[in-house]
Amino acid sequence: MDERRCVAGGDGRLTFAPASDEEFLKAFRRIAVGSLDDETRRNVAARGVEATAREEWEFYLGCPGEREWWRLAYGPDGRLAGLAIPSATPYARNVGFLGVLPEFRGRGYVDDLLAEVTRSHAEAGAELITATTDTGNAPMAAAFARAGYQTTEIRMIWSAPVAEPERAS
């Protein structure tokens, strides 16, 4: 096992380590496939996996959180299982991004990833940790509830319907 993997999160099934930008981009690419996140799904359909992964990576690099906080997660067999990005807004620490690779979904690793982000913020003295998810992403919403996160607001994002091509008469 790589000596960088030194901190256990959740129930200890995953270990966490810093990684290079290229390793994070690779993880973003793999996580985008089959994601339940609505924006990720729309972006993959419109622009493809590569562009979506790069845009998400660049977005989180531009957030007020520190790049040094980011961690890749490895399963008991040492294989990459997901990623955890603690981040921040101008007002509070937040759960920036969590993602489980497709072949590891359904094993409850989302709880371990969320525990790692929460732990890192709490150890840094954060008094408030915020998080968001799509209402349609039931597994992520359930993970927040299991971890004790409380729903304080619901934001609706409305968009115009996609125009259908006109039919010839």
Image: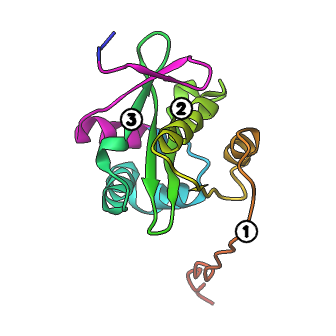
Q: Which residues are magenta?
A: 4-30
Amino acid type of disc 2?
Pro
Q: Does any portion of residue 33 appear in the rendered image?
A: no
Q: Which mark is residue 102?
A: 2
Magenta-colored stretch includes residue 11: yes
166 with respect to 24 (left or right): right
Residue topped by disc 3: 71
The correct choice, above or below, for 117 with respect to 2 in the image is below
Q: What's the CA distance linking mark 3 and mark 1?
A: 28 Å
Q: What's the CA distance linking mark 1 and mark 2?
A: 30 Å
Q: Which of disc 1 and disc 3 is earlier in sequence?
A: 3
Q: Residue at x 54, y 55 (%)?
A: 41
Q: Residue at x 32, y 39 (%)?
A: 24
Mark 2 vs mark 3, foreground winner is 3
Magenta-colored stretch includes residue 6: yes
Amino acid type of disc 1?
Glu
